[in-house]
């Protein structure tokens, strides 16, 4: 199914192609827990930025591997490049347009202990 979403002010808009049933990652790291981010991983080829490339600003912390992309106007991170899935974008589930019929299950991820949690995820 094709869905759209974006930031709060509408400057950044995207479209994704996903299956009707998805798993969301609920990470407890410092940035995800403070923003309530729910990760929906979408392969790069199934993500299209419709508008707002010039409206995005980048932020990196820790190892610098993840590129967090925020709207310069409203400050919302509707998607970003995670270090856990370098082949995919992480789309913020809560930034999808309302009215979709995705069936989502939530999987916890211990981002406070990222290295160990990621090693367990890759087993």
Image (spheres, rainbow, N blue to C red):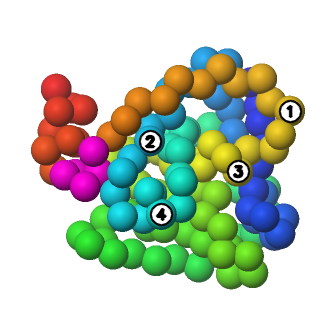
* Location of residue 76 with respect to 95 vertically, above or below: below
Distance in Å between CA atoms under marks 2 and 1: 22 Å
Q: Are marks 2 and 4 in contact (CB under 8 Å)?
A: no
* Left or right position of 104 against 117: right
Q: Secondary structure at mark 4?
A: helix
Is 5 or 16 nearer to us in this picture? 5
Q: Return the disc, 2 or 4, that comes first in the chain's sequence.
A: 2
Q: If the image is split into quadrants, where does the C terminus sit?
A: top left
Q: Is residue 111 magenta?
A: yes
Q: Return the disc, 2 or 1, that comes first in the chain's sequence.
A: 2
Q: Return the disc, 4 or 1, that comes first in the chain's sequence.
A: 4
Residue holding disc 1: 99
How crowded pointer 1 is (Cα within 10 Å; few <14, some 14-19, many 20+) is rated as few
Residue holding disc 4: 34
Q: Which stretch appears magenta? A: 110-114
> Which of the two discs, 2 and 4, sits closer to the camera?
4
Distance in Å between CA atoms under marks 4 and 3: 16 Å
Distance in Å between CA atoms under marks 3 and 1: 12 Å
């Amino acid at each position: 199914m094709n869905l759209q979403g974006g930031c709060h002010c509408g400057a950044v808009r995207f479209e994704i192609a996903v299956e009707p049933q998805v798993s969301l990652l609920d990470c407890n790291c410092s940035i995800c827990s403070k923003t309530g981010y729910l990760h929906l991983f979408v392969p790069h080829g199934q993500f299209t930025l419709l508008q707002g490339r010039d409206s995005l600003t980048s932020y990196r912390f820790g190892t610098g591997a993840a590129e967090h992309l925020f709207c310069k106007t409203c400050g919302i991170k509707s998607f970003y490049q995670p270090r856990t899935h370098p082949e995919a974008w992480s789309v913020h589930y809560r930034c999808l347009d309302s009215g979709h019929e995705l069936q989502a299950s939530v999987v916890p991820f211990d981002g406070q202990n990222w290295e160990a949690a990621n090693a367990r995820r890759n087993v």
